Amino acid sequence: MSKESLKMEMGLHSSTLAHKGTDKKVCRYVPLQAEVIDIDVESSNTYLISLRPLDEEDETVRIDYSPGQFLMVSVFGLGECPISIASSPTRDPLQICVREAGKITQGIMASRVGDVMGIRGPFGNGFPVEKMKGRNVVITGGGSGFATLRSLINYIADNREKFRDVTVAYGARTPQDLYFTSEYGSWQATGIEVGITVDMMDASWKGNVGLVTSLLADLNPSPGTAALCGPPMMINAVAKDLVNRGFLKPEIYISLERHMKCGVGKCEHCTMGPYHVCTEGPIFSYDVVGDLL
Amino acid sequence: MTSTPALFLDHESLVPLIEELSKTLEVVAPVYAEGEPVFATWKGEALALDADNPLNSPVEFFLPQKEVLFKYVQYSGRYTFSEEPPKSRLILGMRPCDLQAIKVLDEIFGTELSDHPYTSKRKSTIIVAMNCTSPGKGCFCASMGSGPAAKEGYDLLLTDVGSGYLVESGSPAGMFVLRANSRHFEEASPEHLKEKERRLALAEEEIVKRRLALTPEQIREAIDETDWEEVERRCLRCGGCSLVCPVCHCFSVMDRGVPDGERLRCRDTCTLAGFSRMTSGANPRASLGERLRHWYLDKFVYIPEKTGMLGCVGCGRCSRVCLSDVDRWSILREAIE
């Protein structure tokens, strides 16, 4: 039998795959290249990196995403890891906020303007912004978890009339660890209430000191929807606090962090009970993941 | 499913047939390596079709232990990527348990976003399955509903009926292979068909009789009842059970080479300590007991919820490779006895 005729016939064989059509989306694992166009230092170990995704002709590609989604970011030779998108889809450019943690993040942070890295995505479900519209929104974060919340905050700031009272409660370890400090004023200018706290103060600090939960007590937000991202201990404490304040568990949305290798629900690294955090998350409502946290 | 009249292939005609096929395809078949049956690229050696099901599952040819996802080459600050097209293959002697495992993996890897490295290999492979008329000592396909008779998912299906193989086609590609090589086959007789049914009924009886069958419901109950801390003390943490499981598909991804190199995908397992550990050091499944429990829950609860099929096909390989003094299924049996 000839190779050509066999190849023709191969398309017709009995596997369950053959019946599923060919028009659906396929993951090839080959990333897009994205050029670093700007690097901002957010803290001593955190950079905000602006990217220009490229097609094969070096032209800019638009990535459609929603707040809360993430990218698989590659440094060729070091590997690939999940990084949440820190920019809002309402604003250019695409930005990721990277804190030095392991060898890949170190590699990302060693990039200079003009270098390229690989990106795949966006992946994950993102915050349910449509459900948040017309409601009060409390956005609470701690540490590097604030990067993904900044995407949501800027999205809300750019669509401010569609949301009711919006409160941001953000905690960092020290004043030097606070991200996006130059933007708080612009959020407040749209009527967003912004509360900031640190665990440890220094001589220059005149703001709040203490846990995010005590900051919430001061801000006393009215019940509505909530978006959370941060260390597990903080998430647990804040989620419980919000429930006590009258928030409903299904309306408390938590962004989770997990080890990930594929981003498309195949490699199993990010599984949490029955869920794949990469495809069914990273945003889960508190009623779904409360027992698994 | 395409139905055509069954054909008959002499035992002696099998090797000439695969010799013919290996001119245009890479033929993978059970052969002996140091006395043990293994699935490997056939190079004319003796076939191990009568031996136990090979310890390495044929899933290796769709999700290899190690594969290159793509190569990257850097030139003046930009990269170009290249992927290797899949080989045209024929896998001979795949048992019904492994066939069922591939059906589960097709559901996991073939649905959005579908995994191109898996599906491309899958689509360029012809499967010549073999009904299990002499089941191995440790397998329990009948309890999991995956064997000993293959129901679907094959291109061609062989059943050893003593004097030769009864050959049935399950797809247009299978029919094409039969037509293109018709000189090797003769028409099957009603006796051949009757012999197939008799042998499969015997095999099923043997599996059910010999195995202390646990239903999936009993297994789910046993997962709750098991003292996982106690199991943790017996497990040697080698990960062998996942390595040979035809449904296990955990993988890791890594790069090799600067500035040019390749991105590799390697099999991994959720039972190893570092599997879900994050860079921060936080580990959602820090204890081995939790990880082992997850291994079973995935097969008997989570995969069934997602695919409608069990994540265990009863091939028994996990027990065959377990280095500890317990086999994986006796853990569950003990729990509910």
Image (cartoon, coloured by chain):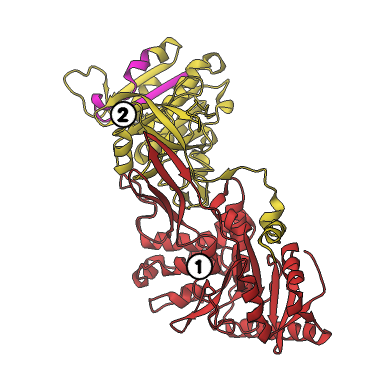
Chain colours: A yellow, B red
Question: Measured from the top left, where is residue B292 in percent x and y?
Answer: 43, 63
Residue count near mark 1 (Cα–Cα under 10 Å), binned few <14, some 14–19, many ≥20: many
* Residue at the disc numbered 2: A112
Tell me the element at label 2: loop
In the displayed structure, B208 sits above or below B246; it is: below
At 47% from the left and 33% from the top, the residue drawn is A243
Q: Is residue B73 magenta?
A: no
In the displayed structure, A142 sits above or below A168; it is: below
Q: Can residue B331 be seen?
A: no
Tell me the element at label 1: loop
| Quadrant of the image occupied by residue A183 | top left
* Residue at the disc numbered 1: B245
Q: Chain of mark 1?
A: B
Three-letter amino acid code at disc 1?
Cys
Three-letter amino acid code at disc 2?
Arg
Question: Measured from the top left, where is residue B54 in percent x and y?
Answer: 52, 76
Where does the magenta region start and end? A166-185
